[in-house]
Image: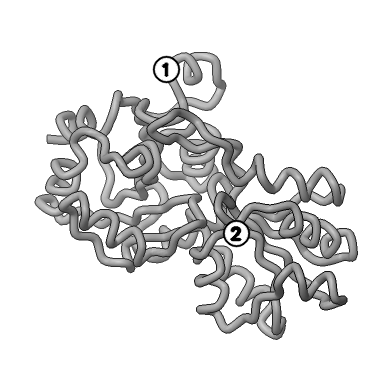
Amino acid sequence: MNFKAMVIDMDGVLWHGDTPLPGLKTFFDYLEAKSLPFILATNNAMKIAADYTQKLAGFGVKVAPEHILTSSEAAASYIKHSFPDEPSIYVMGESGLHRAIKAQGFEILSPEEVKAGAKARIVVGGLMRQALNYDVLAMGSLLVQGGASFIATNYDSSFPSELGLLPGAGAVLSVVERSSGVSPTVIGKPNTIMFEEALRRLGTAAADTVMLGDRLNTDIEGGKKVGMQTILVLSGVSSLEDVERSSLKPDYTFQDIAALSKALA
């Protein structure tokens, strides 16, 4: 393996839910010892970078927010650049997405305001758990049916947890897609927007950068789209059987980051 920087997924690579995976601190110790530039890039839109800095600190790892890229912040930045004069947006998501949108200067319409006749030209959504209810999705669907642009932070069907694979943003937002007949513009992996932003922050060429992830159809597929090298770890979603069945092959495969750290060392 020969690379100058890394883009690293988090869920399924570094942890499952709130449980760190074996070798987490050793892996970051290696990155620090080698002064290897990295960006942690996640499709999870329920948090912003500062939240992940705090989470990693709880695992004994220090990572500054500028080294973390979330799909919520990537989506908010994309909307700001694509629709700079739009005053208000309808948001279907948790606090991380709401905070990211507000940080770009937008006002957020509530389902009650939409019911009362308020309109938005942009509907953006991500994974919802606590915030998930029928009205949130129904009003989003009505706006999209009325011509609003539909943007998804990511469209992962599931995500790994301590309990197993749980429904992801794609599973939730499919309600809006099916009811409106409109497919969203997807910001997160495997879309190239996230990878291009990570490369811009790193300042490295795609060919000199490796994408480390646990999912073939997001991390590996997206990394290959932009010309990155790819490493798959089997500690998350995709299994060795998935790799054998797929035409999409990572450049390297390891059981987990502990095995990867050992190989790199």
Whether residue 211 is visible here, answered yes or no, is no
- Dot 2: within a 10 Å radius of its alpha carbon, few (fewer than 14), some, or many (20 or more) residues? many
| Vertical position of residue 134 compared to residue 162: above or below | below
Q: Residue at left 69%, top 48%?
A: 173
| Vertical position of residue 114 compared to residue 23: above or below | below
Identify the amino acid type marked 2: Gly
Residue 100 left/right relative to 26: right
Is disc 2 placed on a helix, strand or loop? loop
Q: Residue at left 31%, top 49%?
A: 6
Q: Nearer the viewer, mark 1 or mark 2?
A: 2
Rounded to the nearest angstrom, the CA distance separating label 1 from label 2 is 33 Å
Identify the amino acid type marked 1: Leu
As rendered, which of 258 and 19 lies closer to the eye? 19
Q: Position of residue 135 (x, y in %)?
A: 76, 58
Q: Position of residue 221 (x, y in %)?
A: 53, 37
Q: Residue at left 48%, top 54%?
A: 195
